[in-house]
Amino acid sequence: MRKKRIFAVMMTLLMLLTACGGQRNVPAGEKDASGKESEEISDGTGRGEDGEPSEEVELTLWTYPVGGWGNSGTVSSFLASFHRAHPDIRVSARVLSYETGDAEVEEALANGTAPDLILEGPERLVANWGARGLMADLGELWQEGASDDIYESVESACRNANGEYYVYPICMTTHCMAVNRGLFEAADAWKYIDEETHTWSTEDFIAAVAALREYGVETAAAVYCGGQGGDQGTRALVNNLYGGTFTDPAHTAYTVNSPENIRALELLAGMDGISFDPDMVGTDEITRFCDGDLAMAFCWNVSMEIAQTVGNANLDFDIFPMAFPTEAGEPRLQGGIWGFGVFDNGDGARLEAAKTFIRFLTGDDSQYTRAVLASTYWPVRDIQDIYANDRLMNEYGIFQRYMGDFYQVTPGWADARTAWWNMLQRVGQGADVAEAVEEFSERANAAAASAE
């Protein structure tokens, strides 16, 4: 039933996004959107509304795979719509993968071939490239009417400490975890879950893992630490178990070396049924979970369920999304914000054309709604009933109330992410947790200090 429901949702969305036509152009030797290689995209026309070539301003758009924005057909349909409205601006696009995208962007920056527009989140656009002085200030867009209703918590994540805006946001979500409902029920572990609120306590989590082990599940869950992919899951897991934090409230320093976080890591390292895997990243964990090898996934959100339920023929169980376990009170989940940034390529005409593209997708309610629906996430401003008839999105919408602090704009963020999975590897290898955490803290805070 769940597969049929999600399939119907995706078919409706596909018809909405392709109604404007357009086709994708994949260079020879490159994989499609289901692969790991980047993909060049065309709207299939190369001409303006009057049928004549129009090359007054040429832009490049690179998108990370943000929900449906990682699909070449979706992106080309937006380009076709934009080109009909603005035939004097030509946009070519490339869909990046999270496995290789950062390296491709860095190579382009080094070669002076950076894209004009890029779709990603504040952790890259503000805390990384923005902090390095590579992004254009989009403050002009934030002074316009469409920005008035953007949530303040989102706005604060899109600007740096000097008040410069490096992101114009499109969508947001709250990351969560997921469990194999059938396996939990068979192991008599379902009783530890609050089905109505999708929450559980740390004590319930411990009891559920024990029940799964007794039932015969050797590895209930894995703390993956082969790289930074999916690290939002491991950070939220550790911080929630006993109420720890990743940074201070002002986002100036890293606070992982707290007693709460040390206690959480010691718990995980000592639990039968929880493994630390130095060869696994988030995408690997998702695969193992959906293949039935793990009873839980820490790297999860609604777009992953849609992708796995529609595209994974091996999935034969009901996925139940969950908040991370917490000792007391409500969980604080890791949020994601995505929007457009513009690299400062020193060309005023291209900068203005890039702003025109952003205005096209965000200034009109119908286009903005379409852009949000393509992401399979939620709008960053109040749009009533955007998912009113969508049972799946309403189910996942419950997690929006649990969204915690968006701390990914802390200086030195890129170095802190590397230090995090290096620290998890050390803990998994048996290192003293307090020493490993202190080493992380010194490395991450040194990076933060040097970045300011």
Image (cartoon, rainbow, N blue to C red):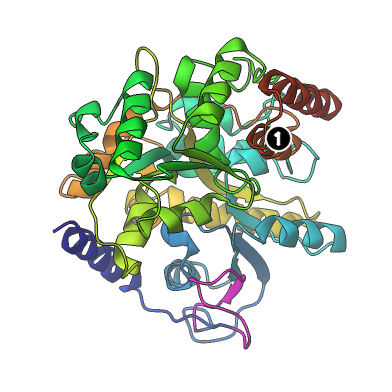
Residue 179 vs residue 431, the one in the foreground: 431
Where residue 106 appears, as percent x and y from the top left, is 78, 56
User: How many numbered marks have been drawn onto this rendered protein structure?
Assistant: 1
Instruction: Report the residue at 30% width, 68% height from top.
Output: 14
Residue 287 vs residue 173, the one in the foreground: 287
Q: Circle 1 sits in a helix, a strand or a loop, which is it?
A: helix
Above or below: residue 258 compared with residue 358: above
Amino acid type at mark 1? Arg
Instruction: Report the residue at 64% width, 45% height from top.
Output: 228
Residue 71 part of the magenta-drawn span:
no
Where residue 139 appears, as percent x and y from the top left, is 62, 36
Above or below: residue 98 compared with residue 23: above
Residue highlighted by disc 1: 426
Above or below: residue 254 compared with residue 355: above
Q: In the image, 114: left or right of 12? A: right
Q: Dot 1: within a 10 Å radius of its alpha carbon, few (fewer than 14), some, or many (20 or more) residues?
A: some
Above or below: residue 433 compared with residue 118: above
Give the main secondary structure, helix, strand or loop, of the magenta stretch.
Answer: loop
Residue 385 visible within the image: no
Instruction: Report the residue at 48% width, 15% height from top.
Output: 243
The quarter of the picture where the N terminus appears is bottom left
Residue 220 vs residue 377, the one in the foreground: 220
Q: In the image, 52: left or right of 351? A: left
Q: Which residues are magenta?
A: 27-44
Residue 73 visible within the image: yes
The quarter of the picture where the C terminus appears is top right
Where residue 274 appears, as percent x and y from the top left, is 48, 37
Where residue 82 appears, as percent x and y from the top left, is 47, 66
Residue 31 part of the magenta-drawn span:
yes
